Amino acid sequence: MSPPAFAAPAALAALVSLAACSGDEGDAISRDTQPFSGIAENETIEVTGTEPFWGMTIDQAEGVAAYSTPENIEGTRFAVERFAGNNGLGFTGALDSGEGVTVTITPGECSDGMSDRTYPFTATAEVGERDLRGCAFTDAQGFTGPQAP
C-alpha cells in the first residue's frame, strides 16, 4: 500500500520547520549572556532621586545599603544581595519595618532634572509600595557637572 498523496508534502514541511528551528550557529540570533560587569563588586554606588527626594548608598564590599529621605537624612541601613543581570545590577533587601527593597542600576546617561549634573547610570527602586526613579554614580565612575549644585 502506498502512502497518501499528502504525506510527502507534509513530511517535507515538517523537516523544513525542524531545520529552521535548529538553525546553524551563523543563522542564530546572537545574545549576550554574560553578567553585567560595568560596575565592579567593590565600588560604592550612590543613588539620588527627586520627586520625592530620596537617596541610597550601596556599599557592595559590606553588602549593605542606606536609604535616606528628607525625613530621615541619616538613612536606614539594611543588608542587600547583589545580582548581575545582562544589562545592569539588581539589589534586594528589606528595611527593619519589613518593607522590601529592590534597586536596579542600568547604564545610560541620566539627569536628575534639577542640577546641571549628568550621571552614568539610571536607577529604579521599589521601597515597600513606593516606586522611585533616579540616577546613579559610583566612587570610580562619577557624575559630570558641578560638585555642589
Image (cartoon, rainbow, N blue to C red):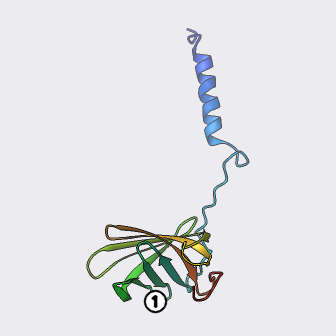
Viewer-side residue, 94 vs 135: 135
Q: Nearer the viewer, residue 133 or 22?
A: 133
Q: Where does the image place residue 125, in percent across and percent down from the top left?
A: 43, 70
Q: Amino acid at mark 1?
A: Glu
Residue drawn 32% across and 80% down?
95
Residue 46 screen position, x and y as percent: 52, 82
What x and y, as percent, mark residue 122?
55, 70
Residue at horizontal 50%, vertical 88%? 61
Determine which residue is flagged by label 1: 62
Question: Where, quadrant-wise, is the C terminus in this rendering?
Answer: bottom right
Q: Is residue 18 above or below residue 133?
A: above
Task: Name the residue rendered at 58%, 83% in the picture.
Answer: 138
Q: Quadrant of the N terminus?
A: top right
Q: Is residue 102 left or right of residue 123?
A: left
Q: Position of residue 129 (x, y in %)?
A: 32, 67
Query: Quick check: 124 above or below 13?
Result: below
Q: In this rendered view, identify the residue nearer to me: 25 or 31.
A: 31
Classify residue 17 by image quadrant. top right
Classify mark 1: helix, strand or loop.
loop
In the picture, residue 32 is in which quadrant? bottom right
Q: Residues within 10 Å of mark 1 (few under 14, many from 20)?
A: few
